[in-house]
Image: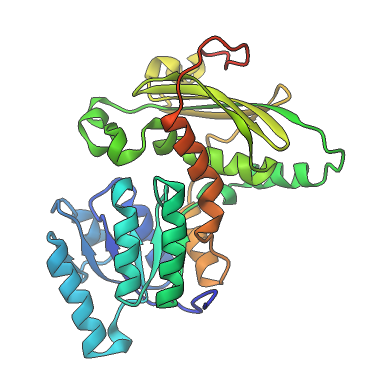
Amino acid sequence: MKESIPLLKRFALIGAAGYIAPRHMNAIKDTGNLLVAAMDKSDSVGILDSYFPEAAFFTEFERFDRFLEKLRRDDPAKGIDCLSIATPNYLHDAHIRFALRVGACAICEKPVVLNPWNIDALKAIENEYDKKVYTVLQLRLNPVIQALKSRIENDRSGRVYDIELTNVTVRGRWYFYSWKGDEARSGGIATNIGIHFFDALAWIFGRAVPGGNIVHLKDADRAAGFLELRRARVRWFLSLRADDLPEKCRHEDQRAFRQIKIDGEPLDFTAGFAGLHTRIYEEILNGRGFGLEENRRAVEIAHDIRHAAVDSNRGDRHPLI
């Protein structure tokens, strides 16, 4: 299989009206490439004017499919090299398959899929079409997270760290009327705002210990639990509620608070997210993108949380519950 694509010049984007889509448009533009076509069932995509006003646009998937297939068949040099996927989580699997069938690689937002076994199926299709699936695990490029990984790798003692993860990302009422509020389509809060952090922790501290994924709280807008990794005991808390923000954040009108404590020492990485999508695209263009297998640990963790029974009686709960 080809491990990378040296130059990705011609892109298409599916999910162009979504919250995260402008970051993909910006990354495509910043890396000097061209957005040929975009698709979303919503036509509220005026943001395209700021990036690629000449891009073809479709509100029906079938016409988008036909357009890309015709480009490829009329002149392979004018087909797309890559499809960027910013659609609802439950559609990622199908849209990755579509990208490979039209002869493109895929750059997919998190989570790449909702279930671990879907990764195996997609790897088989990668081999069949000789095209690559890349994923947006941008937190691995956050400088604070990278410094933490280096620190743990350089600790040869084999010690197990005590970790406290807090991620409060405030969302309004609209959230629960959208696909994000439907666990069957989004994977729930542990997937929507948790999976990047579970990925980062498993990337740094190793895979989850069997039986070490315990859920203490699981509501539509809050979740918490205990996760045992090879080199860490993690108490985690996720929330969409404004009243879970620290007083300082509320006073300064900040809508997010993200912190990791390591043996009681806080690492605040609320900042450091700007420009990471462009960095992800640069990595892909240079043959260093994150592939399917790199997603497995986080997908397994989020899947297990989603299906876990709640155990509220254990003593390893996060302080905020």
The percent coordinates of residue 55 (x first, y second) are 22, 70
* Residue 272 appears in the rendering: no
Place residue 33 in its image quadrant: bottom left
Q: Nearer the viewer, residue 221 or 7?
A: 221
- Figure quadrant of residue 222: top left
How many numbered marks appear? Answer: 0
Identified at 48% across, 40% down, the residue is 195
Image point (77%, 46%), residue name: 153
Image coordinates for residue 53, horizontal then vertical, percent: 21, 67
In the rendered view, does 116 fall on the left or right side of 11? right
Using the image, determine if residue 260 lies above or below residue 17.
Answer: above
Nearer to me, 225 or 320: 225
Residue 244 appearing in the image: yes
Q: Is residue 101 above or below residue 96?
A: below
Asked whether 183 or 83 is in front, the reply is 183
Q: Position of residue 110 (x, y in %)?
A: 42, 48
- Quadrant location of residue 289? bottom right
The outermost residue toward the bottom is 75
Residue under the image location 39 percent in, 31 percent down: 189
Q: Residue at x 28, y 40 (%)?
A: 185
Say whether residue 115 is left or right of residue 296: left
Give the colouring mode of the picture.
Answer: rainbow
Position of residue 20 in the picture relative to residue 197 (left or right): left
